[in-house]
């Protein structure tokens, strides 16, 4: 792996100033404008929430040794839940169990946030089954990846693990077939228009440029309108649109809906294809959809946490909830596979920095095999950091610090 930053966003701004681009009027995918909430990230003022990190540990695990219940405040939990909205129900439930407080002690927006996380999880679970059936029927070699794969592999039905989109891996020769297949389900190539406040039909020239310099296709979007709702459900969904960072949206006539955004990847990065994921894939025990093997899922999650951690501030912390649910279950063979992948792709330093926090921050590295592997992953001081992609510890940056 050679670390590369993503191409800068202003490409779109530069193309927007082009005369031909300026006079185009792309067709809207939805005829009314919507509002999408801005992304929430940790900032330096949120570093005081670091003591709540053990709330990401699975609910059945005792975390009292790492977190003093007397220190927990409803305000801190609410802030932490908003920042880690993908796993907010787990955070709130564990905090209330430890503090012995009822659910209604949380601010109303956080209660609604946890309901929305469950709702978007249910919506995504239904959708990945439809996608998998359609892609398999068309002979497209694929598997789920990232949050979608982790949700189907690690989180039992009824457990919330929300995400902003659905990510699937498709072998490069099958990309055209994959796009044609999902079009049958109502997905269309799209781009977001700030000016018009909606997704619009994608500019083919811009799309070709972006896709030529990236490891995934551009936006592929489907809109879902919630038509058959009771009065109470209607009101709740509108609340979701007001406070949920992604997915749910409010049309200007106050009718609720949701965008489903599908990311089709032909690479894990610019230097790694998705063949690694697809080659290891097997049916999920919960839904039967294809997901990468556990060690490959952990490898990809380590890569993603470290990438986001060293290049950005305040994003990616919630993914420790995924690691905390899958790493302790890896057996010796799976750990050997994981270590071999980290070595092959020059990510031993990434593995060390990410996995060591399972112990220092969460107290969840009890087995000798895990501890021994962590010791082996530590990069010697005289190693060429550039060769080993050793960009330092990402932990402070995950919390918005330096």
Image (cartoon, helix red, strand yellow):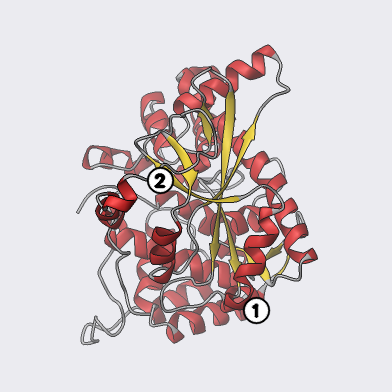
Q: Is residue 391 left or right of residue 117?
A: left
Residue under the point 62% across and 49% down = 187
Q: CA distance from mark 1 to mark 2?
A: 34 Å
Q: Nearer the viewer, mark 1 or mark 2?
A: 1
Q: Position of residue 11 (x, y in %)?
A: 28, 58
Name which of mark 1 and mark 2 comes first in the sequence.
Answer: 2
Which quadrant, please, contains the N terminus? bottom left
For image coordinates 67% across by 68% down, the residue present is 177
The 10 Å Cα crowd at callout 2, few under 14, some 14 to 19, many 20 or more, is some
| Quarter assignment of residue 237 | top right
Percent of width and height locating residue 208? 43, 65
In front: 401, or 195? Answer: 195
In the rendered image, which residue does mark 1 sit on? Answer: 279
Q: Nearer the viewer, residue 61 or 124?
A: 124
Please indicate whether residue 43 sits to the left or right of residue 109 in the image.
left
| Circle 2 SS class | helix
Which residue position holds label 2?
A: 53
**Crowding near pointer 1: few (<14 within 10 Å), some, many (20+)?**
some
Q: Is residue 311 above or below residue 233?
A: below
x, y percentage for residue 65? 45, 46
Q: Residue at x 60, y 75 (%)?
A: 171
Q: Nearer the viewer, residue 351 or 194?
A: 194
Q: Which corner quadrant of the image does residue 231 belong to?
A: top right
Q: In terms of secondary structure, where does tag 1 sit? A: helix
């Amino acid at each position: 792996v050679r670390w590369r930053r993503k191409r800068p966003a202003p490409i779109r701004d530069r193309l927007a100033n082009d005369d031909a681009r300026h006079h185009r009027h792309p067709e809207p995918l939805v005829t009314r404008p919507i509002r999408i909430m801005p992304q929430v990230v940790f900032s330096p003022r949120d570093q005081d929430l670091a003591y709540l990190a053990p709330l990401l540990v699975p609910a059945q695990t005792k975390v009292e040794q790492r977190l003093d219940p007397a220190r927990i405040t409803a305000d801190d939990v609410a802030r932490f839940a908003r920042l880690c909205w993908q796993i907010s129900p787990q955070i709130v439930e564990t905090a209330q169990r430890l503090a012995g407080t009822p659910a209604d002690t949380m601010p109303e927006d956080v209660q609604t946030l946890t309901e929305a996380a469950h709702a978007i999880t249910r919506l995504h679970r239904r959708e990945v089954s439809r996608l998998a059936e359609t892609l398999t029927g068309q002979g497209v070699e694929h598997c789920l990846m990232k949050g979608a794969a982790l949700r189907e592999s690690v989180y039992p039905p009824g457990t919330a693990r929300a995400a902003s989109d659905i990510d699937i891996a498709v072998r490069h020769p099958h990309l055209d077939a994959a796009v044609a297949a999902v079009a049958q389900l109502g997905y269309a190539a799209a781009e977001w228009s700030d000016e018009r406040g909606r997704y619009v039909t994608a500019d083919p020239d811009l799309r070709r440029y972006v896709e030529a310099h990236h490891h995934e296709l551009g936006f592929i979007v489907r809109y879902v309108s919630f038509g058959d709702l009771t009065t109470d459900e209607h009101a709740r969904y509108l609340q979701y649109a007001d406070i949920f960072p992604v997915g749910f949206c409010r049309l200007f006539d106050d009718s609720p809906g949701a965008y489903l955004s599908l990311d089709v990847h032909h690479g894990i990065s610019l230097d790694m294809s998705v063949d690694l994921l697809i080659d290891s894939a097997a049916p999920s025990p919960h839904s039967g959809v294809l997901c990468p093997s556990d060690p490959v899922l952990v490898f990809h999650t380590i890569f993603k946490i470290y990438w986001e951690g060293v290049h950005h501030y305040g994003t990616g912390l919630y993914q420790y909830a995924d690691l905390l649910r899958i790493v302790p279950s890896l057996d010796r063979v799976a750990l050997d596979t994981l270590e071999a992948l980290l070595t092959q792709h020059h990510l031993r330093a990434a593995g060390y920095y990410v996995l060591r926090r399972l112990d220092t921050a969460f107290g969840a590295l009890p087995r000798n095999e895990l501890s021994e592997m962590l010791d082996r992953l530590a990069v010697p001081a005289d190693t060429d950091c550039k060769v080993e992609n050793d960009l330092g510890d990402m932990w402070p940056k995950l919390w918005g610090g330096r």
